[in-house]
Amino acid sequence: MPNDELDIRGLVCPKTVIKVLQRARTLEEGQTLIVLTDAETATNSIPKEMKKKGIDCNVERTGLGEWKIEISKR
């Protein structure tokens, strides 16, 4: 199953969380959503919301002020 990507650079909370939650709902088991963000607050708020939903989440800094968040539905 192919991964999905969501670029939310330029958005701030709560829009970052809302966009990710909307897309995460469409994930199928075993699929990964790659989220690109430049909002540091999203690196805390998105994993927090995913944990509430029982969805795995991993945050990786990819550059100065940029992060990749991998969200996996198992």
Image (cartoon, grey):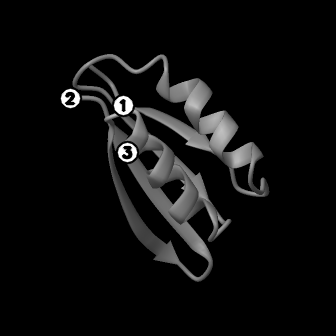
Q: Secondary structure at mark 1?
A: loop
Quarter where residue 31 is shown: top left
Along the line of sight, which residue is nearer the eye, 35 or 50? 50
Query: Is label 2 in contact with label 1 (beta carbons under 8 Å)?
Result: no
> Whole-percent x and y of residue 8?
68, 48
Q: CA distance from mark 2 to mark 3?
A: 13 Å
Query: Is label 2 in contact with label 3 (beta carbons under 8 Å)?
Result: no
Viewed as shown, does residue 37 lie left or right of 54? right
Q: CA distance from mark 2 to mark 1?
A: 13 Å
Quarter where residue 13 is shown: bottom right
Q: Which residue is tagged 1?
A: 3
Viewed as shown, does residue 33 lie left or right of 31? right
Rendered residue at 75%/48% (across/down): 14
Along the line of sight, which residue is nearer the eye, 38 or 63? 38
Rendered residue at 48%/28% (across/down): 24
Mark 2 or 1, which is nearer the eye?
Answer: 2
Callout 3 crowding tier (Cα within 10 Å): few <14, some 14–19, many ≥20 = few
Reading the chain from its start, which is encountered first: label 3 or label 1? 1
Callout 2 crowding tier (Cα within 10 Å): few <14, some 14–19, many ≥20 = few
Q: CA distance from mark 3 to mark 1?
A: 20 Å
The relative height of residue 16 versus residue 29 in the rendered view (above or below) is: below
Callout 1 crowding tier (Cα within 10 Å): few <14, some 14–19, many ≥20 = few
Query: Is label 3 in contact with label 1 (beta carbons under 8 Å)?
Result: no
Viewed as shown, does residue 43 lie left or right of 50? right
Query: Tag 3: residue type?
Result: Lys
Q: Which residue is tagged 3?
A: 51
Along the line of sight, which residue is nearer the eye, 48 or 5? 48
Q: Secondary structure at mark 3?
A: helix
Q: Which residue is tagged 2?
A: 74
Query: Tag 2: residue type?
Result: Arg
